[in-house]
Image (spheres, rainbow, N blue to C red):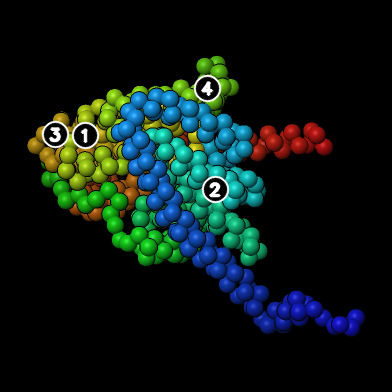
Amino acid sequence: MSCGALSPQEHFKRFAKAVPGFDTSFDLARRRAATAAGAISLGLLAIVFAWTGDKAQQIFLSITRSYPYLPLILTPSVFAAVVWITNTWAPAAKGSGIPQVIAAGKDLDLAYSKLLSLPTAMAKLVLTVAMLLVGGSVGREGPTVQVSAAIMITCHKILRVPMTAGVLIAGGAAGVAAAFNTPLAGVAFAIEELASAFEQRVAVLVMAAVVASGLVSLGIAGDYVYFGVMHETLDVGSVVLAAPVAGILGGAAGGLFSRCLLAFARSGHSWFVAVRKRPVLAAFACGLIVAIAGLLTGGSTWGTGYETTKQLVEGQGDASVWFGPAKFLVTTATAVSGAPGGIFAPSLSVGAGFGQLLSFLFPDDPMAAIVLLGMTGYFVGVVRAPLTAVIILMETTASRGMILPLFMTAIIADAVSKLVCREKLYHGLSKGFVVQRSSQGDSAAKQA
């Protein structure tokens, strides 16, 4: 090639500049390609993660049938090991995963850090499955959100597309949609939890990502209702009585859970500080609580609690009256241990047990309908996202006839939860990752 010859890249640049609007169109095409590739990839990964998580729970329950007291040793030991591994090699993988995405949305520099890297995401998946393998009360929805955001970021890096908060929002929304098979809930979650300002441009991006991941899930896993179909409804008189009770009590209980998690994560009280200084020992103690509670409840509180919740929603069987309180205890213990894992599914299970207790106050009403109100009240109390909660429950139970009672319960629960815990759980936990990055930046500046 002579000195005056142009490389193919230079020819392309000149062509792009010569054609009006070509640069903009090409960049837009790359953005769309990156979003589509990320959404399809995360849809596939969500299916694999769901299958692996379900198998892990089945294996654990099979082991406990042959060795019923093994969890007393196995569960706390693995809890401690998982927390030690997380703190040592993958600190960005701890907890739910949703706070990490919220933190990155507020500070885009975090999107290029280990917080949302693929190695962290893969560690998150493996460690969450490890928790399910020993009965940990964790869900896969939060981890799916973090992994989805990491996949979106990777696809945008490969195609050299600038990262925006909208990409993170779209990835997180698609993750929720793929995890629960709830497209509308994914969009609602993006509005309420991930986006502080939801613009039309971001809305289109979110819907495109949700559609792509949803089509992958639908094509492989089929069209299914997550918790089974709930056919019951409530008359107006029952709604007026039951919805406020479920909203007040559920909102208070969910707010208490949130306040407890935030205290363990950030409180400056000497007792909480002492616990945080011994994370592995604390995780062992939390694992022991989970193991003992599972033994006392016949194993119903181990794992996500999906099977028991589905039975209560479909009205096919009665769980122990202790299921709700015990599930609350083990979910709290698992969450404060600092191990990777989500709280969506476990919170819905706690709410189902709570709803079962409420049904004794309303014996003339269908128990399944009251259970659904309990799930709404408690779940809203925890996550403070009433629209997301109602749509998730409507889509996962096919209970469109209950939408007005669910909205009434959700509005009341949100107000009550705010009185108990003023700060929203995920946003409060996300501050820890922002502070962590600031501390690292200060240390680097001092060394320089």
| Front position in the image: 52 or 34 | 52
Q: CA distance from mark 3 to mark 4?
A: 43 Å
Left or right: 448 in relation to 140: right
| Dot 3 or dot 4, earlier in sequence | 4
Q: Nearer the viewer, mark 3 or mark 1?
A: 1
Q: Quadrant of the N terminus?
A: bottom right
| Dot 1 or dot 4, earlier in sequence | 4
Q: Looking at the picture, which amino acid does disc 2 mark?
A: Met
Q: In percent of the image, x 13 and y 41: which residue is there?
A: 366
| Front position in the image: 447 or 283 | 283
Give the residue at mark 1.
Answer: 319
Which element carries disc 3, helix, strand or loop?
Answer: loop
Which element carries disc 4, helix, strand or loop?
Answer: helix
Task: Tell me where residue 289 appears, x and y as whole percent.
Answer: 39, 24
Q: CA distance from mark 3 to mark 1?
A: 17 Å
Mark 4 is surrounded, within 10 Å at the Cα level, by few (under 14), some (14 to 19) or many (20 or more) other residues, namely: many
| Dot 3 or dot 1, earlier in sequence | 1
Mark 1 is surrounded, within 10 Å at the Cα level, by few (under 14), some (14 to 19) or many (20 or more) other residues, namely: some
Q: Which mark is residue 122?
A: 2
The reply to whether callout 3 and callout 1 are in contact (CB within 8 Å) is no
| Front position in the image: 352 or 56 | 56
Give the residue at mark 4.
Answer: 281
Which element carries disc 1, helix, strand or loop?
Answer: loop
Left or right: 67 in relation to 434: left
Give the residue at mark 3.
Answer: 362
Mark 2 is surrounded, within 10 Å at the Cα level, by few (under 14), some (14 to 19) or many (20 or more) other residues, namely: some
Q: Looking at the picture, which amino acid does disc 3 mark?
A: Phe
The reply to whether callout 2 and callout 4 are in contact (CB within 8 Å) is no
Q: Relative to 142, does residue 69 appear above or below in the rendering?
A: above
Residue 299: quadrant of the picture: top left
Mark 3 is surrounded, within 10 Å at the Cα level, by few (under 14), some (14 to 19) or many (20 or more) other residues, namely: some
